[in-house]
Image (cartoon, rainbow, N blue to C red):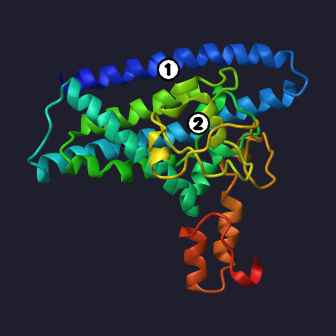
Amino acid sequence: MTPEYLEQLGNSLDEVFFVIGLAILSIEAIKGLFSKSFRWRGFADMFASISTQIPFLVIEIFILSFAYLGFIVLAETYITWTFQINIWTVALAVLVADFIYYWEHRFAHQVRVFWTQHAVHHSSRFMNISVAVRFGPLESVLSILFHLPMLFLGFPPALVFFGIIAVQAYQVWIHTELIGNLGPLDGIMNTPSNHRVHHGCDEKYIDMNYGGILIIWDRMFGTFQPEEEKPRYGLKRDYDSVHPISVWFSEIPGFVDDVRNAKSFGEAWMYIFGKPGWAPKSRE
């Protein structure tokens, strides 16, 4: 198995989940036409979600191209231990990438500067397939940083990036309300039911179910929450815009204002690297 074949396999995987997502989206759109609660705002929200791909792809293509070259240089210059590419190392790469994704995802929720990007994904008041492609412009930066250690574990760059692609591609189909509970599968895999919880802004659902493909990481690290009542989707704060530009940069104005108005270096540090919502005690 060659890096070129692995790249082709990654593209095929992307295409398969794209077709699945497109089929679900078509059903959701038809259903939305007959739903009074959906109608104009729902379709405007879908458009806003899809529009985030404009800045995301422009920046991601640039970042990932340089990151891939950088990974190759690092691997060829400093790493002498490397796995062969075969069916077993491909499966292992996906498993390790999924484990890393859990922590990357959790980190994005807990560190405000990264939340400014990931919050875009959570800003919709709806749950449908279009939300699967709703990304902040710089989300891929955190992914590259977190997956870098895979190189030093012996995974060649082609395996690292295949793992990233596989975990992301899988998550397309779980952004929907069309699929209900899936029984025992909900206890092992990240399913639509589990992921609806993750997008909920109800107190019991916030910061739960970070998994990408497997939900067992959440069970292991205490962040699992089954779906009980239907979640209220979106950000905890009152944000309900469907304007594309507002969606792209929804967290940036508040972030910049807080850092600029910080009274000390310590406050500025916490506004940047503290948990989203952090404020000095005197202002809470």
Name which residue lies at 69% across and 78% down. Answer: 261
Distance from disc 1 to disc 2, alpha carbons, whole Å, reads: 20 Å
Question: Do the CB atoms of the residues marked 1 and 2 lie less than 8 Å apart?
Answer: no
Q: In what element is the residue under mark 2?
A: helix
Which image quarter holds the C terminus?
bottom right
Residue at which label 2 appears:
54
- Seen as rendered, the residue at the extreme right is 36
Query: Could you say which quadrant of the image residue 115 lies in?
Result: bottom right
Residue 222 in percent (x, y) is at 51, 52
**As rendered, which of 164 and 206 lies closer to the eye?**
206
266 relative position to 123: left or right: left
**As rendered, which of 65 and 28 lies closer to the eye?**
28
- Image height of 20 relative to 246, above or below: above
52 relative position to 76: left or right: right
Disc number lying in front (1 or 2): 1
255 relative position to 239: left or right: left
Residue at which label 1 appears:
17
Local packing at callout 1 (Cα closer than 10 Å; few below 14, some 14-19, many 20+) is: some
Q: Amino acid at mark 2?
A: Ile
